[in-house]
Image (tube, rainbow, N blue to C red):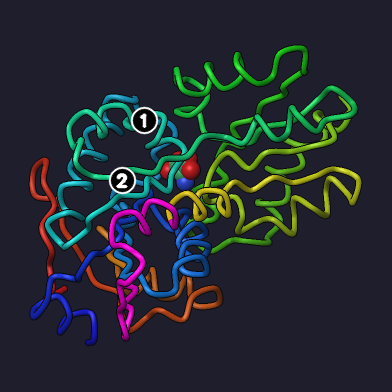
Amino acid sequence: MMANSLRNKTILDNAIGVFDSGIGGLSVLTEIRKSIPRANLIYFGDQAHVPYGPRPLEQVQQFSIAISKFLMAQGAKMIVVACNAASAASLKELRRLFPQVPIVGMEPAVKPAAEQTLSGAVGVLATPATFQSELYASVVERFANGVNVFQSTCPGLVNEIESGNFAGEKTRKILEEALLPMLANKIDSVVLGCTHYPYVLSIVKSIVGPDVRVINPAPAVAKQTAKLFGQLVGASYTNPVPVTEIITSADKQKLIETIREFFPFENHISNAKWVGPSLIANVTQ
Ligand code: DGL
């Protein structure tokens, strides 16, 4: 109800638009909310198209451009691409198309992993789109010189997480298949290179044990977002009732069920619909 009334009456003031293919970027949104309590946040999860990982980069780029335009039309003055796959596919193009808009993106945290490894071996869990990208290749080339980087696409994991299977047998099996060979190769860090994966952090930790560091870049992304937001609105900006609004391109009720245990946001969830290549806010669904 509340989301509908917000949507009908107001364009959110100085909002930060955050997006992902689905619920993954909510792990980043949570960190952003902690870092910037006063900001209005509009989150878009493209659950009509999830997963992005197996899709061609060009297609993910088209989605990202349309979503960014949509978020700006809802009042976003800056954009956080809370998705490694979408960042890999579109960050350069988004910055070219919208030079006036601060855009924060994500890349797998290979740098801190490579800087701190003692064993000389690190693991990266990400989706195929991320691994295929120039952005990932350049991160590995720049920061992981002399370090063995073991990769896994964790096939099927994003779908399990989207259906709310955060701790079941299938989820554990996918992660064991990814991580056990990496452990055999003596990794001492594992990078969560997909924003969906913090949902299964406890399983990852239970598989790798206490001696392997698990790196989630979300807090660093939130820190960068806070810095750019501060520059955008200035130190005197106040917002007595900061709003967090979540929009999905798929089933709103299903989203509420899936994220219930993590996010108390259900009064602020609404729908948008893809119409051809564009998104429109759909308050009636
Ligand atoms: N959460 C996304 C990422 O960080 C993508 C997951 C997917 O849709 O494949 O890469």
Circle 1: element type: loop
Which residue range is magenta in the image? 226-244
Residue at image coords 67%, 38%: 191
Q: Viewer-proximal residue, 220 or 161? A: 220
| Disc 1 residue: CB within 8 Å of ligand 1 | yes
Quadrant hosting residue 247: bottom left
Is residue 23 something one can see in this rendering? Answer: yes
| Disc 2 residue: CB within 8 Å of ligand 1 | yes
Tell me which numbered mark, 2 or 1, is placed earlier along the sequence.
Answer: 2
Placement of 190 over or under 218, stated as above or below: above
Task: Say the numbered circle drawn on residue 183.
Answer: none
Q: Which residue is mark 1?
A: 55
The image quadrant where one finds the N terminus is bottom left
Left or right? Give the position of 23 relative to 27.
Answer: left
CB-based contact (under 8 Å), mark 2 and mark 1: yes
Left or right? Give the position of 6 relative to 243.
Answer: left
Quadrant hosting residue 219: bottom right
